[in-house]
Image (cartoon, rainbow, N blue to C red):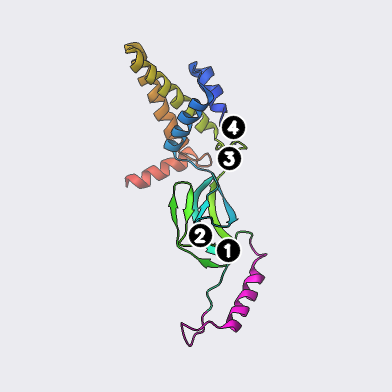
């Protein structure tokens, strides 16, 4: 996969379809198209933060949360669920300390229930050093996702289709309506192509489709 800058879509839409838009409007349209394609290149992240009013503001690139952990361990005496054994606790903390350098994403602590409200993670109380293990979308310095060559082509068609269709409705121009329909067909074809990972060959894709048919 080539990591193309998101704004390369703007240049391609302009050169192929003559589209010129305000950059913020372009980003809104192109991001909507990117969501419809559905490809998301992610990597694993570990984020540690304190709560404020039982909330933690999530990083902007969060896609899937794997775990939320508190910096405490559940250690109970086997003889009684109500008894807290400090010897077992010390042993457990020692064992956990030996695992810390094995994997940077290893999470020590107690899993905690949470809810997501908008851009915030909501817990049942305030805690310090809450660890969030999550898959984050790979983005550039501006927080926009990197794109494959096929995604750039598809999104250029999508931006052109949305803008042409909007103008055709505003102007009630049948010629523009027909042009928008043609560009929409390009978008749907390119969108389907962009959904196929670059590392899958056409022969492999044919095998997948053959299995689904059978």
Front label number (2 vs 4): 2
Residue 9 position in % (x across, y down) = 53, 27
The residues bearing labels 1 and 2 have C-alpha atoms spaced at a distance of: 8 Å
Residue at the limit of the structure toward the front, as seen here: 53
Q: SS class of the residue under badge 4?
A: loop
Q: Is residue 97 magenta?
A: yes
30 to the left or right of 5: left
CA gap, disc 4 to disc 3? Answer: 9 Å
Q: Residues within 10 Å of mark 4 (few under 14, many from 20)?
A: some
Query: Marks 2/4: CA distance?
Result: 30 Å
Q: Residue at x 62, y 74 (%)?
A: 93
- The disc, 1 or 2, on the residue closer to the chain's N-terminal end is 2
Earlier in the chain: of badge 1 and badge 4, it is 4
Can you say whether 135 is above or below 105 in the image? above
Which sits earlier in the primary sequence, circle 4 or circle 3? 4
Res. 180 image quadrant: top left
Using the image, determine if residue 119 lies above or below residue 78. Answer: above
Mark found first going from the N terminus, 2 or 3 = 2
Spatial separation of the CA atoms under disc 2 and disc 3: 22 Å
In this orientation, which residue lies closer to the viewer: 134 or 179? 134
Q: Which residues are magenta?
A: 76-103
Q: Which residue is mark 2?
A: 67
Q: Disc 4 designates what residue?
A: 5
């Amino acid at each position: 996969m080539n990591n193309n800058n998101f704004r390369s879509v703007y240049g391609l839409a302009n050169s192929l379809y003559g589209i010129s838009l305000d950059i913020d409007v372009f980003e809104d349209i192109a991001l909507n198209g990117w969501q419809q394609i559905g490809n998301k290149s992610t990597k694993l992240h570990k984020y540690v933060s304190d709560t404020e009013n039982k909330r933690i503001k999530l990083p902007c690139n969060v896609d899937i949360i794997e775990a939320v952990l508190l910096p405490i361990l559940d250690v109970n005496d086997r003889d009684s669920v109500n008894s807290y054994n400090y010897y077992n606790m010390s042993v457990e903390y020692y064992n956990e300390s030996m695992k810390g350098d094995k994997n940077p994403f290893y999470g020590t602590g107690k899993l905690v229930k949470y809810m997501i409200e908008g851009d915030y993670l909501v817990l049942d109380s305030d805690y310090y050093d809450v660890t969030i293990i999550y898959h984050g979308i790979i983005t550039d310095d501006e927080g926009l996702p990197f794109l494959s060559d096929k995604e750039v082509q598809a999104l250029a068609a999508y931006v052109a289709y949305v803008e042409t269709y909007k103008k055709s409705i505003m102007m009630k121009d049948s010629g523009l309506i027909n042009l928008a329909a043609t560009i929409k067909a390009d978008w749907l074809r390119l969108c389907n192509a962009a959904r196929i990972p670059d590392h899958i060959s056409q022969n492999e894709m044919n095998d997948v489709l053959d299995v689904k048919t059978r």
